Image (cartoon, grey):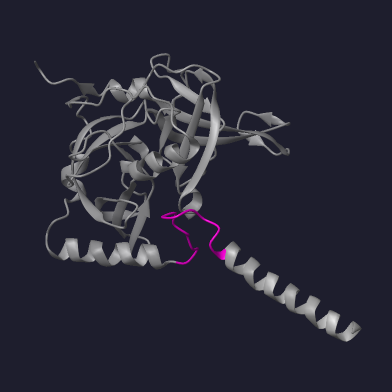
């Protein structure tokens, strides 16, 4: 009797374990991607880029970098959305608008071709894409290269033009050869305490979605040491890391209030450039939508 009971209980436990593993393996919602940490994704992008390059559909860096002096462009932008979205809806909007943007370049150091992608987000359906200026600068050891963009489905598109750029604000608008992007509106009307989210690929960790608030606004210090009073930055508590640059920071309605530009760790013995103490706080800094809008003229009526 005891042995029979033991076998019955053991059978139930085994069954529960099997059912439990089935439940865990299907714990994400319908249509939610499950990411891996292998190099398959980049290999697929490289295969497509090689074909685009062989077909002559990519634009050389000598053409694109000569367009960095363009200060403005004319675009018809969406009006900001007013309806608040749920967390799931925000994730869906952020993911649909997320683009990987960067270089396919020939390295002068090792002689190989590399893909170096950060992020961007569409402002129009037909391929006007915002990102950081530092994302579209040529990589340090590049001999030659091409700017490309890729969406979450793995489709790859040539960057055909620099529409407008400002290195001081770290904002740039590109023309990408696509006709069916999911654009987001720009919203400069944001306050400390407002909710915000970010979808990006920090250090290559694909599809990382985080939630936070706007902390403050500030004028950054430029490379020459002066304070840029004409530039506005947002500090937020959403997470990112290198590789997230250019990713949209969205408000609770799905409008872009800016995009990722930098991350800084503050220590308890911080003095100038010396940061040898334990990290106390990490500052996540974003380019403001105001400074992206400064690159855009509305179409003439």
**Quarter of the picture holding the N terminus:** bottom right
**Nearer to me, 165 or 215:** 215
Q: Taking the image as drawn, is residue 110 in sight?
A: no
Most distant residue in the right direction? 2
Q: Position of residue 89 (x, y in %)?
A: 43, 38
Q: Taking the image as drawn, is residue 229 in sight?
A: yes
Is 260 a magenta residue? no
* Segment tinted magenta in the rendering: 25-38
**Nearer to me, 268 or 131:** 131
Most distant residue in the left direction? 301
Q: Is residue 185 above or below residue 150?
A: above
Q: Position of residue 67 (x, y in %)?
A: 18, 36
Q: Residue 273 occupies which quadrant of the picture?
A: top right
Q: Residue 126 occupies which quadrant of the picture?
A: top left
**Predominant SS of the magenta segment:** loop
Q: Position of residue 295 (x, y in %)?
A: 25, 24
Kindly identify the residue that appears in the image at 38 percent across and 19 percent down.
Answer: 188
Q: Position of residue 280 (x, y in %)?
A: 70, 34
The number of numbered discs placed on residues in the rendered structure image is: 0
Q: Is residue 75 above or below residue 2?
A: above
Residue 18 placement, left or right of 202? right
Is 29 a magenta residue? yes
Q: Residue 165 occupies which quadrant of the picture?
A: top left
């Amino acid at each position: 009797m005891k042995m029979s009971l033991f076998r019955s209980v053991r059978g139930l436990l085994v069954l529960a374990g099997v059912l439990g593993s089935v439940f865990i393996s299907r714990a994400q919602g319908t249509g939610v991607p499950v990411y891996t940490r292998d190099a398959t994704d980049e290999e697929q992008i490289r295969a497509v880029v090689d074909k685009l390059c062989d077909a002559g559909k990519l634009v050389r860096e000598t053409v694109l970098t000569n367009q960095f002096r363009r200060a403005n462009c004319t675009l018809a932008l969406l009006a900001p959305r007013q309806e608040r979205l749920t967390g799931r809806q925000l994730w869906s909007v952020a993911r649909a608008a997320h683009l990987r943007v960067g270089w396919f370049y020939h390295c002068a150091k090792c002689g190989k071709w590399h893909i170096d992608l950060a992020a961007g987000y569409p402002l129009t359906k037909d391929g006007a894409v915002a990102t950081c200026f530092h994302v579209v600068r040529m990589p340090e050891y590049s001999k030659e290269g091409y700017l490309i963009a890729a969406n979450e489905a793995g489709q790859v598109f040539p960057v055909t033009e620099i529409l407008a750029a400002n290195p001081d604000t770290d904002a740039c608008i590109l023309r990408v050869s696509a006709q069916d992007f999911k654009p987001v509106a720009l919203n400069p009307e944001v306050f400390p305490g407002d909710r915000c989210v970010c979808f990006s690929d920090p250090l290559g960790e694909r599809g990382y979605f985080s939630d936070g608030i706007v902390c403050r606004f500030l004028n950054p210090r430029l490379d020459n040491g002066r304070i840029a009073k004409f530039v506005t930055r947002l500090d937020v508590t959403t997470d990112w890391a290198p590789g997230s640059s250019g990713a949209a920071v969205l408000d609770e309605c799905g409008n872009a209030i800016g995009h990722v530009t930098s991350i800084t760790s503050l220590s308890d013995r911080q003095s100038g450039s010396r940061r040898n103490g334990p990290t106390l706080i990490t500052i996540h800094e974003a380019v403001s939508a105001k400074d992206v809008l400064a690159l855009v003229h509305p179409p003439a009526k």
